[in-house]
Image (tube, rainbow, N blue to C red):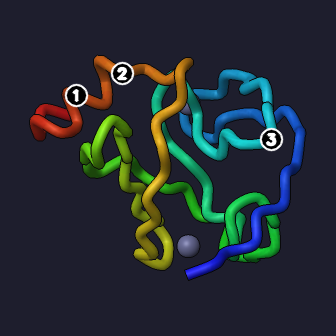
Amino acid sequence: MAKSFIRTIEDFTCKHCKIIVKGDGYTNHCPDCLWSMHVDVNPGDRLHDCGGLMKPILLDKKGDIYVISHKCEICGFIRNNKIGNNDNFELAIAISNGSV
Ligand SMILES: [Zn+2]
Ligand SMILES: [Zn+2]
């Protein structure tokens, strides 16, 4: 399944923990608390008007890549995102253990 990816470089403020996240064009979640926002239809396009906070609910490993699932608090939409190098990996592990 081919998905278009539009790279958008922008800084944003995490609506959950309020830190300023340095955008690198790929990050769509906060590296500190790992919460995301429901703003994309396709990754990076910022075309979705839901705008809900997306809670990190699950950590999965696909080969060498860790994938975190986010669930929108407003509409319940679930999206999988790759964990980034700067992400709070200890928290991701805690989420996968169900301790958060
Ligand atoms: Zn945050
Ligand atoms: Zn939503």
Q: Secondary structure at mark 2?
A: helix
x, y percentage for residue 9? 89, 40
Q: Earlier in the sequence, mark 1 or mark 3?
A: 3
Residue 65: mark = none
Residue 93: mark = 1
Q: Amino acid at mark 1?
A: Ile
> Where's the C terminus, which quadrant?
top left
Q: Which residue is mark 2?
A: 89
Q: Amino acid at mark 3?
A: Gly
Please, is residue 48 above or below residue 46 in the view? below
Residue 25: mark = 3
* Ligand 1 under 8 Å from disc 1 Cβ: no
Q: Amino acid at mark 2?
A: Phe
Crowd class of label 3 (few under 14; some 14 to 19; many from 20; radius 10 Å) = few
Crowd class of label 2 (few under 14; some 14 to 19; many from 20; radius 10 Å) = some
x, y percentage for residue 7? 84, 51
- Alpha-carbon distance for marks 1 and 2? 6 Å
Q: Which quarter holds ligand 2?
A: bottom right
| x 56%, y 48%: residue | 36
x, y percentage for residue 54? 49, 56
* Residue 45 lies in quadrant: bottom right
- Alpha-carbon distance for marks 2 and 3? 20 Å
The residue closer to the viewer here, 32 or 61, is: 61
| x 23%, y 37%: residue | 95
